[in-house]
Image (cartoon, rainbow, N blue to C red):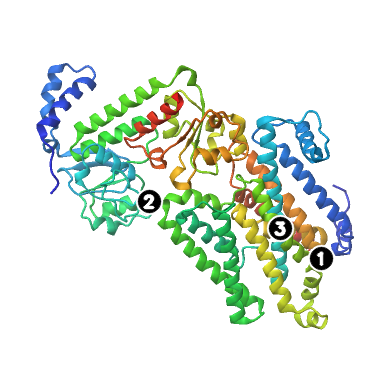
Amino acid sequence: MPRSLPRPLVAVPVALLLTLTACGDDSADAGAAAPETSASDAFPVTVTGADGELTLDEQPETIVSMSATATEMLFAIGAGDQVEAADDNSNYPEDAPSTDLSAFTPNAEAIAEYAPDLVVLSDDLNGIVDTLDALSVPTLLLPAAETLDDSYEQLEVLGDATGHSAEADEVVADMQDRIAAAVASVPAEAQGTRVYHELDPSFYSAASTTFIGGIYTQLGLENIADGAPDATGGYPQLSAEYIAGQAPGLIVLADTKCCGETAETVAQRPAFGTLPAVQDGRILEADDDIASRWGPRVADFAEAVAGTLQG
Amino acid sequence: MTTTAPGAAGTVVAPPARRRRAWPALAGAGLALVLALLAGVWVGALPLPPGAVVVTLLDRVLGPLGITLPGALEGTEAAVLMELRLPRVLLAALVGAGLAVSGAAYQGVFRNPLADPYLLGAAAGAGLGATVVIAWSPVQSVGPIGIVPLAAFVGALVGVGCAVALGTVAGGSHTPTLLLAGVAVAAFLAAAQTLVQQQNTDDLREIYGWLLGQLGNSQWSDVVLVLPYLGVACLVLLLCGRALDVLAVGDDEASSLGVHPGRLRLLVILAASLATATAVAVSGLIGFVGLVVPHIVRRLVGGSHARVLPMSVLVGGAFLVLADLLARVVLAPAELPIGVVTAFIGAPFFAGLLWVGARRR
């Protein structure tokens, strides 16, 4: 059986956080509420995912995560021990129990084999949520976040669902602090730098309306993908000549693992050699996974981008 | 439009197109290709002054002769024109020409108006090759050649090779058997491609991007790469035009006129497949060009292969350059997949052509 965390240690920061975050509450109320949030007492709990409300009578101990982001979140909030199996894309953290379960072509029977008391998913493909419902397997659908706030909310929902609300609050607070620090560290002269975020070598990019684009907005950057019409759904395929014409001062490569792109390969592309980002060496070779997920490591990403702007 | 009565119009149209001289149509198609190429280099996501574009191009052409022209583009603008836009437009013309002429050749060999360059498993084979290396290849290139074009090229040839081998074993030079063999091989390879793709969902975006066709990464090296293969294939196909016309009369009659039907078919299929494999290698799967362009051309110059094949080269090139232009402009600065554009324009155009044809008859 998974180890359980020492409850009193959890309860103290919870009390502190409640005091800090609750608006208009006086401290006496917050202090009184604190003991109730210890993990085992918190159940039954009702959480809301994109597939509706879910009531968990007991703390789930056999979680199947069908979302690489959810896996990262679960481990970050200390619920890693409760994760019995994770899908084939869950490659972080290293001790994540990744299996050959496919989130893209999910198989309800293969999931049910783990006898999960909670299945977390990011996509409802092939009607998997309904199928799992039919098997009376509790599901929590947490789709791709569109903003950082969505991401924080999903962490909190997972915290509530797994009995780790306090750690979830800590993780959220830590992310907020680190992202705020990254934003503050961007030098004044780098404000408004044009950024080109590359999803693959055929110039697919991400506009400000997307989750990753929102990070650039927070950092005070101008995203060249915003020049594309809204009809392209936030992930337009740009052309090499448009990118060259926009002369970006920062290029972020989110295709280093998939496609082997590096600062050198970018510099060698036709007409890219004269771009300010190439000339000034402001090309961030990002981790594709971090840049395409909405988990806690997004703070690492924000710090990396801010760091490149200082260099 | 004229006010001629319908009956009179019918008699005006009556003389068959094939009695016309070939050169006005060829000259017209050549002009259309030149205009398409010019439009292609003039328009793009980065606005360039049209005059300066022409001056720059002339400057580069005359450069080796020691002549420099004032007013040429410089810096990023020059790089965009010379390194990005020009190779892309030229590659579009080459790919369009290759697909259209091989489509015309396939239609001639199989005497089937629905034949297209992808009929014998070239597309499915190339798709499988590209998907396999996108998913599993540890290297990005072999020497100067990218691994994806290489695998697509080999895959296309292997696909056609399997179909031809299977068809020959099963039915000799009987073309319907070869067609069916092509269908079987294509279905099998497509299934294998889907299987590999499902196992590697990380690479879906790249695989789909390739399957939908792309010219956005065109470089001079691609142009140089495809030119010899396309050149040889087109030359062989153009030289086979007369013989295909003889073959159209019937196998026995062709034999008595000194044409060996089986060998001719094999030669044309191999040349057309080489052109297709080359086009597919650098641009992915661009549909409809190879099907529609030969039909457009037949409306213009009649059914003779000696005319349809060279016209298909010119019209196919112009068609794909214009389709790529639309792909770049419609959502600018974002791009549409070129395969979507060719089908989006090609299909209604084709339907209109059929409708007009039906009314004439």
In the image, residue B296 sits, relative to residue B86, either above or below, namely below
Give neighbour class at mark 3: few <14, some 14-19, many 20+ (Cα, 10 Å): few
In the image: residue B42, left or right of residue B342: right
Q: Secondary structure at mark 1?
A: helix
Q: Secondary structure at mark 3?
A: helix
Give neighbour class at mark 1: few <14, some 14-19, many 20+ (Cα, 10 Å): some
Q: Which mark is residue B306?
A: 1
Circle nearer the viewer, 3 or 1: 3
Q: Is residue B119 visible?
A: yes
Please give the chain letter of the residue carrying mark 1.
Answer: B
Q: Residue B21 at x, y = what percent?
A: 90, 60
Cα–Cα span, label 3 and label 1: 22 Å
Q: Are marks 2 and 1 on the same chain?
A: no
Circle nearer the viewer, 2 or 1: 1
Q: Nearer the viewer, residue B150 or B281?
A: B150
Q: Amino acid at mark 1?
A: Ala
Q: Are marks 3 and 2 on the same chain?
A: no
Cα–Cα span, label 3 and label 2: 46 Å
Q: Earlier in the sequence, mark 3 or mark 1?
A: 3
- Give me the residue at 64% from left, 76% from top: B176
Please give the chain letter of the residue carrying mark 2.
Answer: A
- Reading the image, the residue beneath label 2 is A125
- Reading the image, the residue beneath label 3 is B228
Q: Are marks 3 and 1 on the same chain?
A: yes
Q: Nearer the viewer, residue A197 or A124?
A: A197
Q: Secondary structure at mark 2?
A: helix
Q: Residue A112 at x, y = what percent?
A: 24, 56
Circle nearer the viewer, 3 or 2: 3
Please give the chain letter of the residue carrying mark 3.
Answer: B
Q: Nearer the viewer, residue A110 or B86?
A: B86
In the image, residue A96 sits, relative to residue B294, either above or below, namely above
